[in-house]
Amino acid sequence: MSVSEHIETLRAKHQKLEGRLEDEINRPHPDDTLVADLKKEKLRIKDELAQLTTH
């Protein structure tokens, strides 16, 4: 997998997590642990994307 393909894969994962996070937050009783986990994973992916796009 090339770097550009890896970046696109990470962007797709980030978008998917954003959707899951939005769905969970909008539930009547969101699971705070799940929300925190989704946010951590999004941040990890964002950091990896930043590292790949700045080098």
Image (cartoon, rainbow, N blue to C red):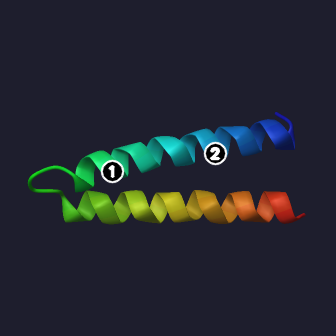
Spot the residue most to the left: 28
Any mark on residue 11, and which? 2
Mark 1–mark 2 distance (CA, rounded to whole Å): 16 Å
Depicted 13 relative to depicted 1: above or below? below
Residue 24 or 41: which is nearer the viewer?
24
- Secondary structure at numbered mark 1: helix
Could you tell me which residue is drawn at 52 percent across and 44 percent down?
Answer: 15
CB of mark 1 within 8 Å of CB of mark 2? no
Q: Quadrant of the C terminus?
A: bottom right
- Residue 50: percent from the left, percent from the top? 74, 64
Could you tell me which residue is drawn at 35 percent across and 45 percent down?
Answer: 20
* Three-letter residue code for mark 1: Glu
- Residue 39: percent from the left, percent from the top? 42, 63
Using a 10 Å C-alpha cutoff, classify the residue at mark 2 as few (fewer than 14 neighbours), some (14 to 19) or many (20 or more): some
Any mark on residue 22, and which? 1
Name the N-terminal-most of marks 1 and 2. Answer: 2
Could you tell me which residue is drawn at 85 percent across and 44 percent down?
Answer: 3
Instruction: Give the image quarter of residue 48.
Output: bottom right
* Three-letter residue code for mark 2: Arg
- Residue 24: percent from the left, percent from the top? 25, 50
Depicted 37 relative to depicted 26: above or below? below
- Secondary structure at numbered mark 2: helix
Q: In the displayed structure, does residue 29 sit left or right of residue 20?
A: left
Depicted 23 relative to depicted 1: above or below? below
Could you tell me which residue is drawn at 9 percent across and 52 percent down?
Answer: 28
Q: In the displayed structure, does residue 13 sit left or right of residue 48?
A: left
User: Foreground mark, 1 or 2?
Assistant: 1
Instruction: Give the image quarter of residue 9.
Output: top right
- Residue 46: percent from the left, percent from the top? 62, 61
Instruction: Give the image quarter of residue 29.
Output: bottom left
Using a 10 Å C-alpha cutoff, classify the residue at mark 1 as few (fewer than 14 neighbours), some (14 to 19) or many (20 or more): few
Depicted 2 relative to depicted 42: above or below? above
